[in-house]
Image (cartoon, rainbow, N blue to C red):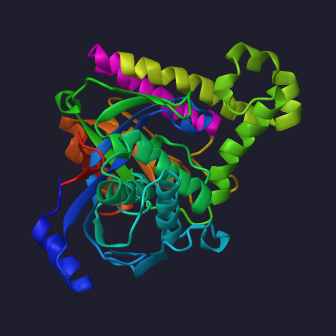
Amino acid sequence: MIENKQLLADKFQAAFGAAPERYFSAPGRTEIGGNHTDHQRGRVLAGAVTLDTRAAVRINGTDQIRILSEGWPMCQVSLADLSVREEDFGTTPALIRGVAARFVQLGCAVQGFDAYVTSTVLPGSGLSSSAAYEVLIGTIVNGLFFDGQATAPQIAMIGQYAENVYFGKPSGLMDQMASSVGGLVTIDFFHKDQPQIHSVDFDFSTSGHALCIIDTRGSHADLTDEYAAIPGELKQVCAYFGKEVLTQIEEDQFYDALPALREDCGDRAVLRAIHFYQENARVTRQVEALERGDFQTFLDLVNESGSSSWRLLQNVTVCGRTRHQEVALTLALCQRYLEGRGACRVHGGGFAGTVQAFVPMDLLERFRTGVEKVLGQGACHVLSIRPEGGVEF
């Protein structure tokens, strides 16, 4: 799971001219159920995976945080100024500054440190490299300067704060929570300051299926507006009722108001809200199926989720694009090579990125070969659930 310490130490030594003192790791995550439910304070089913972001770290005695990520330029953030900078939206320094600022707000005396970071959670992989990075920085600060006082859920919320306020991305909390907590978990976000987190007692290795994440090789460039439109349109629906999120509105009340909602918000917003109500309930059914060992029902629900995401949520194809429809094509490939078995669905935010598939073991090699013939070598990743979240090792 975790890269050899000596190799990481050597890279740190070469970068900073001294030996590291401590080592930290945070995993990527896979969303198993609850596509775009977290930002409406709904329910999700998610798991940490056996790909991670790691760091060798040393306190440097200054007010500067210096982080060198393998293959990227050095990031340097001054603790003397932790204000929000709109010109830094969308950058790594913004995430670092946001995590540090939130810890300072909580009473932590953050100091400068050096870190060398490597990662197997590739950017754009759909396994949430940004959340793994945020949780990694939070775990480092918590371990070095806060005596581990922040809990895993609190570190996740600190990461979300950095992404929302400092990075400028209106993300939900699922990615950070799954990375920080670890294992297979179901999370109910209704109480936003105290999400309800429960471990799910199921071992995927006994299911006879491989958990595959397929890189569609689609670009995330220029998709921020597409992602933001989903919570934006649902916010319009909520505003009709004078509420903040859909979990505050009864489903029957929503359906009773459909004529007015279509007029005020448009049909796509209404369809996306219908997806939310169905998907939110589906998460509970998925958890129940897994805990009673009914894997076929679970697979059926994964397929239902995929269908709902495509038809109602509409996060498979960017509106108006005809030449590039990588997620739709990948789903079609998965369905062909699954031969009516297993399950597949759009994974995470959608529009580009990845597709998730549960592939029967006897079909795995043909499935992988068929998918990679079209998408390229290395597009199909076979993963396992990692029991640990953000940790020092």
The image quadrant where one finds the C terminus is: bottom left
Q: Could you tell whether 376 is left or right of 39 in the image?
A: left
The percent position of residue 179, horizontal first and vertical second, equals: 36, 46
Q: Quadrant of residue 386?
A: top left
Q: Is residue 292 above or below residue 129?
A: above
The percent position of residue 352, horizontal first and vertical second, equals: 52, 55
Q: Is 230 in front, or is 9?
A: 9
Q: Is 379 in front, or is 186?
A: 186
Q: Quadrant of residue 70?
A: bottom left
Q: Residue at x 61, y 67 (%)?
A: 83
Write the start and end of the magenta stretch as one range: 289-313
Q: Is residue 295 magenta?
A: yes
The percent position of residue 265, horizontal first and vertical second, equals: 82, 37
| Residue 197 visible within the image | yes
Q: Is residue 202 above or below residue 28?
A: above
Q: Is 278 in front, or is 46?
A: 46
Q: Residue at x 52, y 60 (%)?
A: 101
| Residue 323 visible within the image | no
Q: Residue at x 49, y 33 (%)?
A: 34
The percent position of residue 293, horizontal first and vertical second, equals: 26, 16
Count of numbered circles on the image: 0
Q: Main secondary structure of the magenta part?
A: helix
